[in-house]
Amino acid sequence: MARTAPTPDKGRKGGGRQTGLARRSSLVPWRAMRIGAKPDGAVERLGLLLNLMPVPIGESMFGMAVARSLQVAQKTGMLAALAERAYTAEELGRDLGLQVEGTALLLDVLAAQGHVEIQPGERYEMTARARRWLDPSSDRYVGGFLADNWHYWEWWAGLEDLIREGRAVELHDRPPDDPYWRSYIRGQYEVARLSSGEVAKGVDLAPGSTSLLDVAGGHGEFSMALCRRHESLNATIVDLAGSAAIGREIVAEAGMADRIRYVEGDMFEADFGGPHDGALCFNIVHHLPQERARELFAKIRGSLRPGSPLCVLELFDRPPGKQPDSGALMGLFFHLTSGADTYTVPEVSDWMTASGFRAPKAITFRTLPSLALLRGEAA
C-alpha cells in the first residue's frame, strides 16, 4: 500500500518513522508457518532430532540460493516457458538466449524445490503443484510478485546498516512515473487475490451498503471483492499517484471502473468524502507511530455513518511470552524497508476505541495465517 515519504519520529517505539500514508475471536491466535530445515528422508530427520546437523549453515547458505534461483527463473522467462511445455536445458537456453550449463544447473535447483520435474529424455516440466502458482494462465498466479521480489535482494543487503545505525530503506519514496510502481502494485494485487474473498466476508458490511472508503487501497482488489459481494456498493480508494495509476488499470481490466474511483493524495490530507458505510485500513498501521494512527482512525471515523465498521488488516506483533514464527521475518522486513514497527492487538484496539469506535473484535483467516483483521463499528 502506498504512502508518503517518511520523516523521523523520535517518540515512536523502536525508533521508527512517521509517514503519511473467517474465524471470529476476541484474541488473535499467534499462528503462522515455522521457519526451519525440512529433512529429506529418515536419516536427516533423525539427524535433526538429535541435533547432529549444522542447521545454521543450511539456513545461511541455501536460503540465498533458493530465493535468487526463483527470482532469476522468473525474470529470464524460464518459468513462463516451462508452464507452456517441457524443455531440455539446451532447448530452453536456446529459446531464451541463456547459457546452457547455468540453465541446466538452475533447472536442477527448481526440480529439487519441487517446482519442475525431469521427464524421460532429460526434459524439464512444471509440476502440477507449481502450476497453481507459477503458470501465468492460473487465477492464482504469483509470478508478478516473484518479479517484484527482485528488488528485495538489494534491500536485504542493507540489513547490517539497519541493525548498526538504524538506517532503513524507503521503498515507497519514488516518483509517480517510476516503473517500480507497476512491479510493486501488480505483485501486491496477485497476492491479494488469494485472500480477498475470505477477507470480504470478515469485513461484513451491512446489506444494502452503498459506499466504501479504502485508505491506501492501491491495487483495489479488496474493494473489488466487496463490490462483487454487495451489488449496491461503490468504493473510493485514496492513495498516492503512482499507486493509483496502476490500480486504475487493474480495476479497469476487471470491468469495475464504473464502481470504483480513485482519489490521489496523502491520506492525511486527501478528502475522504462520505458518509461511508464502511472503511478499510489495510497494512498501513505498521507504518505509523501511535499518534498518527489515532489521527488516521479519527479522520476515518469522521467519514463514516454511525454503526459502520472500520476494518484494520495487519501483521500484529506477537503477544508477550509467545514464541516467534515466520511472522518475525515480515516484522523485520517492514522495519528494514521503512523503519516501520508492528503493534499488538490490544494496542491498536485501544487506539480505535479512543478514536470513536466500539471495542473491535479480531478475525483471523485461513488464507492469511500471519495476519488478522480488527473490526470496530463507529460509535
Image (cartoon, grey):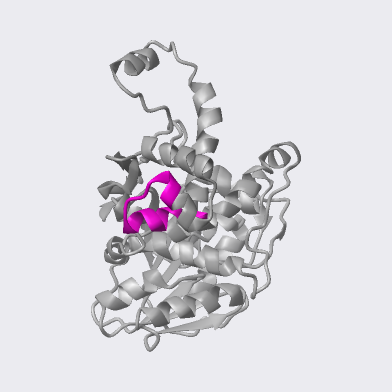
- The quadrant in which residue 375 appears is bottom left
Q: Position of residue 287 (x, y in %)?
A: 58, 57
**Residue under the point 25% across and 83% down:** 231
Question: In the rendered image, is residue 79 in sight?
Answer: yes
Residue 181 among those drawn in magenta:
no
In the image, 213 versus 96, the foreground residue is: 96
**Placement of 282 over or under 331, stated as above or below:** below
Magenta span: 74-91
Q: Residue at x 47, y 41 (%)?
A: 106
Extreme-bottom residue of the structure: 258
Q: Is residue 221 left or right of residue 200?
A: right
* Front-lying residue, 77 or 362: 77
Seen from this angle, which residue lies furthest left? 207
Q: Position of residue 242 (x, y in %)?
A: 59, 74
Residue at (46%, 40%) from the top-left corner?
A: 104
Lateral position of residue 161 relative to residue 171, left or right: right
Q: Find residue 108 and report its image quarter.
A: top left
Q: Is residue 33 visible?
A: no
Query: Against 133, is 44 above or below?
Result: above
Residue 60 in the image, given as x and y percentages of width and height = 55, 29
